[in-house]
Image (cartoon, coloured by chain):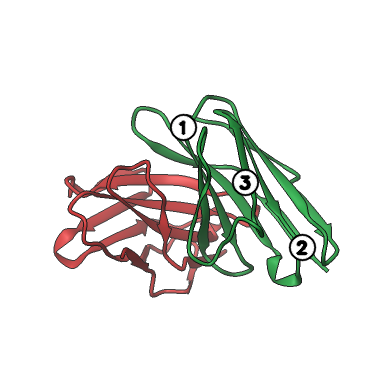
Amino acid sequence: AQKVTQAQTEISVVEKEDVTLDCVYETRDTTYYLFWYKQPPSGELVFLIRRNSFDEQNEISGRYSWNFQKSTSSFNFTITASQVVDSAVYFCALSEGNAGNMLTFGGGTRLMVKP
Amino acid sequence: SAVISQKPSRDICQRGTSLTIQCQVDSQVTMMFWYRQQPGQSLTLIATANQGSEATYESGFVIDKFPISRPNLTFSTLTVSNMSPEDSSIYLCSVVAGSSYEQYFGPGTRLTVT
């Protein structure tokens, strides 16, 4: 069965610091998809990225970057020069098989960015 | 992409009553999911609702407690029946849309049971 672990339950940083959120996953499938979502205090889930198991290229989007390493079953998320607006709960999730299947979520990491 | 709306956005209900949550999508989608997020917790899948078939429930969730309807490709409802304080959660619907199978979430329904 699939499993996603986010070991960091809460992280606190000062604005402009870089921060990395860890995500480790378990799956027996060779085809799977990994996601990151942001949940601000308003409660809605904001899609950040999806990565399939055959694409290990790292991705950068503005201040956000993602490091996918199949060898360690990790899909870590780094925010560079954090801002107060980055304060939220971040969820890593896994979908086995095709990307349209159900998501298994990690426990989430609450990020607090202080001014 | 898909734009999803949910009604109500929040509600406070008394124990023993039922609440029906609506999920409306701006495009036709095959797969819809209902998730629950208990206070301070992660999201857990309740059921998968495909149009034209019975919903498929995950372990720990039963149809009598969480009946789901999926009358067409743009709409679904989730009912939380015979509520207890333990049902206080955010309930979110999710759809798969687009050629890239992106998963989108509705804004959620914040339910408090007293």
Whether residue B113 sits left or right of residue A37 in the image: it is right
Whether residue A67 sits left or right of residue B14 in the image: it is left
Q: Secondary structure at mark 2?
A: loop
Task: For label 2, count other residues whose C-alpha is less than 10 Å away and answer few (under 14), some (14-19) or many (20+).
Answer: some
Which chain letter matches label 3?
B
Label annotation for residue B68: 3
Q: Residue furthest right?
A: B14
Q: Secondary structure at mark 3?
A: strand
C-alpha separation, residue under disc 1 versus residue under disc 2: 29 Å
Residue contact at pointers 1 and 2, CB within 8 angstroms: no
**Amino acid type at image mark 3:** Ile
**Amino acid type at image mark 1:** Thr
C-alpha separation, residue under disc 1 versus residue under disc 3: 15 Å
Q: Residue at x 47, y 66 (%)?
A: A108
Q: Are marks 3 and 2 on the same chain?
A: yes
A85 or A70, nearer to the observer: A70
**Amino acid type at image mark 2:** Asn
Disc nearer the start of the sequence (1/3): 1
Identify the chain drawn in green. Answer: B
Residue B83: x percent and y percent? 76, 64
Residue B97: x percent and y percent? 44, 32
Residue indicated by mark 1? B30
Disc nearer the start of the sequence (3/2): 3
Residue B2: x percent and y percent? 52, 30
Which chain letter matches label 1?
B
Task: For label 3, count other residues whose C-alpha is less than 10 Å away and answer few (under 14), some (14-19) or many (20+).
Answer: many
Residue indicated by mark 2? B82
Q: Residue at x 59, y 42 (%)?
A: B106
Task: For label 1, count other residues whose C-alpha is less than 10 Å away and answer few (under 14), some (14-19) or many (20+).
Answer: some
